Structures are given as structure tokens and as C-alpha cells.
Image (cartoon, rainbow, N blue to C red):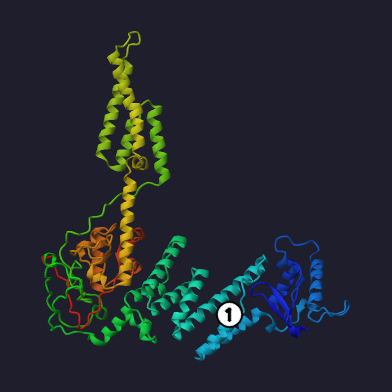
Amino acid sequence: MSGALRFEILGPQRAWFADREIDLGPGKQRAVLAVLLLSTGRPVATGQIVEAVWPDDPPANGPNVVQKYVAGLRRVLEPDRSPRTPGQVLSLTDAGYLLRVDPEAVDAVRFERGVQAARRRHESGVTEQALAELTAALDLWHGEPFTGFSGAVFEAARHRLVELRAVALETRAELKLDSGRHRELVGELVELVAEFPVRERLRHQYMLALYRSGRQAEALAAYRDIDSLLREEYGIGPGEALRELHGRILRADPTLTAGVPETGWPASASAARQAENRVPAHPSADSNPAAPAAPPSAPPPAQAIPAQATPPPRASGPSPQASGPLPQAAVPPYADLPSPLYPALAGLPAGPPSPFAVDQPRRERHPLPTWVSTTATVAGTLLPLLSFGTGTWLVMLAYAVRRRSRRLGLAAVGYLLTAVLLVFMIATDDLEKEDSAAEAFFGLGVLGLCWLVGALHVLLLNRWVWGRITGRPQAAQARDEERRVRREQARNLLHRYPSARLEFAIGRPDLPRAFDDGGLVDINAVPDHVLATLPGLTDAQRRQVAMDRWVRGPYASIEELSARCALPLAVVDGLHGVLLFLPPPVLTTDTPAVVEAGPTVPR
């Protein structure tokens, strides 16, 4: 009978005899069978069964209980066996209980063997057969294995099988990408990314499938999703492979579409491939620079961009990457000079600051945590009340030192003088003599100023309380939200219409424009003076970014910027929503080059 038995553990546990499903009995009996199926063809000691099925509270008479469930399994697996006949499917040996079935009768064994066979075929170069083997093996899964069973044995087996399935799914996706089935793979990868959200190989394949399907914006959005997830949940960034793919997608690397029909490429990748075929790799240094090309939507003559100075031609020679770092004397201190790696950025001239230039960022000290601020406000309010105003000046002095406020310092001096006056009045008051109405009114005024007014003043120094009264935080939040929405709209516009970069000068606050992009800055295109307006950057960091960009070329992502310039994490987080990392436009014979202006004054 064992030749007709089949078992499923890759999902709900089930068993068949021929085409008839078998009722395996209660949960503990099923658990005993699951332990035996994990060791098909090998005997399992009674103690191991007890430890696996009852990991926390084993029964006192464990061997007898196991024997009871084994007898129940024999009745359902061999219904035609007489009671006193030794079992043929489930027998007792000197080493323990042995389940005598063909290993191929267990779906988990067939799955592992199918994955191994697919790997061998793939190594032999038979991709289609390997893909068919993997698909057949993965079709054996019907859910999570060993549901309802607890304990270290089942947890380890469950984890191992799920990991094997995840690797098989990644391998199948890789085979489909290699065979050009990226369009049909996108939907499958959406489900897999949701099931395994932190497996970076699946994210890598998802981004690549989207890009090869002409969905570059969605591929970049997929990278932002995994980047946000890893940073918020685990405090880390994506791995090197994902960062590299993200940079190549931003640069529209033609090698990403190798072997893919051109109809499936993104527009930027097609343009890059055409440009490679038309533009010489190393233009001669004697060629005259072409006249600047007007953007598709040219501004009115009154707002025309002033002509840019053409830098002197440089002698041809090996690039800095090939010849090593440049000498110190050959490297200018600012990035406004034309880069030796990227001498011309088509359509992106660097002019003087326009009326739309970026405002200087407001540099504030790090605020205290909310609980510290609240505790300080409560304690500072109680001190004037309990000291009848004589301690108000101490609270004001502490706030003046913390906020470096001259006004609060003057207020502290005023409260100190008032407290001294109050103490002097109390000390010199004659208790035998009745005070006049004017003296009593003056004394109550001084006491109220130090006591009640001082406590109210301290309460209003809390930024949250002051904001609730004046409404300023709500207005500031509304402005910040409006700018954030405008930045997202500008990013979406760039993803859908790359030419909008030139038409509306997105990310170029140094150019005259009427389009509001919410303060985006294209770090690969803006001149050096715009870098000084970026939030959180010190002057030394700004010079380092400018120098690194000039020598080594543009940045592909915020991670590359952070790695190349060793920026602190707090600075990187502040720049994440403001910076654009657009690749330099591809120069073609139809698009004249526009060379960025060099310095107009000696450095």
C-alpha cells in the first residue's frame, strides 16, 4: 500500500491513498506523522518524537502516548492490516519508528529535488528546461508548512522550507529576466515583494523588470520604498547591489537593456543608446563649442538668460579616472568651473542668481525633546508660584542662556529688580502702621508682576503653548506641506516628461523661471553658490561636495553623495527630500552643447 500513498506538508497537512484523501485524525497524531515525514526513510527515536510534539510540557508517560498515536496512524495508513500483523508502512525498529514510503511520495522531497535538478540544468545552459523544472517544483506549494504545530523542530523545518522556496522564486525570476519576460514578471514580483518585503534580490529584480518595461519612474519609486522601509524599521540603507542599480537607472545605463527588444526600453535608455551611436566618445579639443540651444519653451526676451562665458579649450589627454587624482594646483576651489569629466551640460547653463534664488536656510539649534520641554515648563511655572515671584528671574535667566536671547536676559534683570524691590518693601514695612491705598496698590502690583505675570510669562515661553495661541506652527506646517507637495509634483513631472527639466528649469534656483518646484536642487547642475543654501551643510562640507563633484563627476543618489563626502546621517536626512540626482543630459549632434560658465572673478 505504501506505493500508493502521497503526503503533502507544503501547506495544510494532507495524505492520499490513490485518489482518496485520508483522515489523519487529531492534531497530536498529525504532529507525530509530521515528525516521521521530516525523516522519511530514517528511524526516529521515541524521545525525539516526544520532544518535537510536546516541546514545553511533555507527558509523564510519553512513550505510551506516542505508541497510542502510532497505532492510530497505522489504522488510517493501513486499513486492511489485521490488528496483530506487524506494520508494513509504519514499523518499530531498534532505533525507533520508521515510516516506509518512497521519498517521492512526500511533496517537500519532490520540491527539493526539483530545485536541485533545475539548478543543474541552468548550469548546463538549458534555461527553458530549468525554468520548467522550477515552476513545477514551486507549484507543489499550497501554503505555509506545519501550520498549527509549535516547537523548535517544526519552526526550524518551516524556516528552512520557506527559505528554499524564496530562493527558488528568486531564481525563477532571474531566469525569466534573462529570457526577456520582464513584462509578465512585473505582476508576479509585486506579490513576491509584498510577501518578502526585505529580500533585496527580489527588489532588485522588481526594479529591473520595471525599468526594462519602460517604467523608469516606478523603478525609482520602488527603490525609495525599500530605502524608507529599511531606514525606518532597521536603521540601515539598501545594499550595494540595489544602490548600484538605482544609480544605473538614474543614468539610463544602456547595459540594463542588453538583450531586450528596443520597444521595451525606457525613452531615456533609447535616447542614450542612440546618442552612443551618433556622438564620438572623445570630441577633439579644437572643435568650436556650439551656440547655446534654447529650451523648448523659451522665456520672453525680457527674461532671456545672459550669455555664458565659454571656457578656454583644454588639451586632450587621459581622464582623471585613468591618470589618478589631479595635482592640488590644477584643482580649482569651486565647482562653478567646467568639470574635467563632464565639460558640458546641455540645456543647463549656470547663470548668476535670479530673482527666484533659494533663500538662505534658517539654522536653528536642536530643540529639546518634548518631555524635557514639558517638564521644564511645569517646573518653571511652579517656581514663581511657590516663591511668590521671587524666583521668576532664575527661570528667565535659564531660558535666556538656553535660547541665547538678549530680550529674555533683560526680562530676567527686570524680574530680579522687581523681586529685590518686593523683598525691600516687605522688610521695611511697619506692621503697626496702616498703609495708604496707594502704597497697598503699589505693593500688590509689584507682587502680581513677580508672581502671576511671571508664571504666565514662563508658561508662554513654551513653544507649543505659544504656537497654540498665535497659530504660527499651523501656518508653518501648512507652508511646509505645500512645498512638499510641490516637490512631489515636480518629481512626478520629471518622471513622466523628462524634457520638463529644461522647459521649467526644475532643480535650478539659480536660473530665471516662473515654475515653483518647492525648492528642489539638482546637485549635479547647480553652481557652487547654490550649494551654500542647502540645509545643514557647513561651509567646509559645501566645499567638499563642490570639489568632489568637479573631480569625480555627478552623483547618482543620496547614498553615493553621503559615501563620497562622508556626510553625517543627520545632514543626509535633511537633504533627502530636497535634492535631485539627474544624470547629465546626453549630447547629440542635433543638440548643441551649452558649457557652464567658469568663474568671472579671480578665486
Q: Can residue 390 be seen in this view?
A: no
Q: Is residue 312 above or below residue 50?
A: below
Left or right, 36 with respect to 361, comes to right
Left or right, 58 with respect to 293, comes to right
Quadrant housing residue 496: bottom left
> Which quadrant would the N terminus be assigned to in this image?
bottom right
Name the residue at 22% across, 56% down: 359
| Amino acid identity at mark 1 | Leu
Mark 1, residues whose alpha carbon is within 10 Å: few (<14), some, or many (≥20)? many
Measured from the top left, where is residue 124 in percent x and y? 51, 91
> Which quadrant would the C terminus be assigned to in this image?
bottom left
Q: In this view, does 274 lie above or below 550?
A: below
Measured from the top left, where is residue 19 in percent x and y? 73, 82
Quadrant housing residue 272: bottom left
Nearer-the-camera pick, 275 or 329 = 275
Residue marked by disc 1: 138
